[in-house]
Amino acid sequence: MLMFPGMTALDLVGPQAILAGLAGDRLHLVARQVGPVPSDTGLSLVADTSFDACPRDIDVLFVPGGDATPGQMRDEATLAFLRDRAAHASWVTSVCTGSLVLGAAGLLDGYRATSHWSVRETVLPRLGAIPVNRRVVVDRNRITAAGISAGLDFALVLAARLRGEEYARTSQLVAEYAPEPPFSAGTPDSAGPDITARAAAILKDLADGSLAAAMPHRNR
């Protein structure tokens, strides 16, 4: 599981909570260097494995998103690491704008994929991906999930493929994942134009920065 300064903690923590039961001590929290990694809200998580120490032969490669996504889309060390490990991974996966980082590494060319709604239709196509408006999208060995909260959905989809549906259902119950949101505002369609405009204003720097970072990849 890739970590980088400015990631969204929930993108990683939700899936990690589900997948830790599968992987045990084989789950590596990987960053360029071992140690604390601050998220985009200031909460720090701890990387236990460096790029160099990360095993090459892996079952799952996972990338979160976050406010620092545009920087990661331009970071050659991160992109090279992802390309190398993806070549050996059984599954190449992401949550939220992590799919843009995969795309910048050339790992979504010709794949159906999703991302946060604020960048899905505008940025993913510039990275060679085919945008799909779904919470979790599986295309061959690529699994991508929509924004932030979709990480739990992603983890259960992946767990079912790794260990079977019964295991995934049990993990869902252990987590008591039975969402009943107090509002119907989780997508632009359900939120309506006014709320969507407010949310888009909050996300403008991320969306604009991601689009700018994707521009060099357009004519690859």
Image: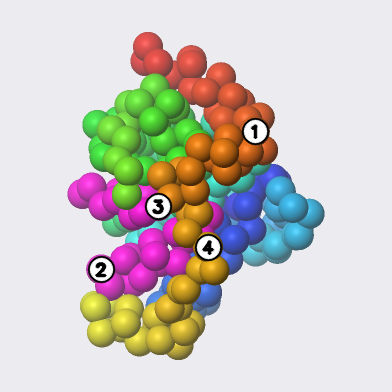
First reached walking from the N terminus: tag 3 or tag 2? 3
**Where 126 falls versus 112 (above or below)?**
above
Q: Quadrant of the C terminus?
A: top left
Camera-nearest label, 4 or 3 = 4
First reached walking from the N terminus: tag 4 or tag 3? 3
The 10 Å Cα crowd at callout 4, few under 14, some 14 to 19, many 20 or more, is few
The residue tagged 3 is 145
- Residue 95 marker: none
Give the quarter of the image for residue 35.
bottom right
**Where 113 falls versus 39 (above or below)?**
above
Span colored in magenta:
135-162
Q: Is residue 189 left or right of residue 201?
A: left
Magenta segment: does it hold 67? Answer: no
The residue tagged 1 is 201
Residue at 39%, 61% in the rendered image: 154
Q: Name, please, the residue furthest toward the left.
A: 140
On the image, the x and y values in percent for residue 58 come to 39, 59
**Where 120 falls versus 216 (above or below)?**
below
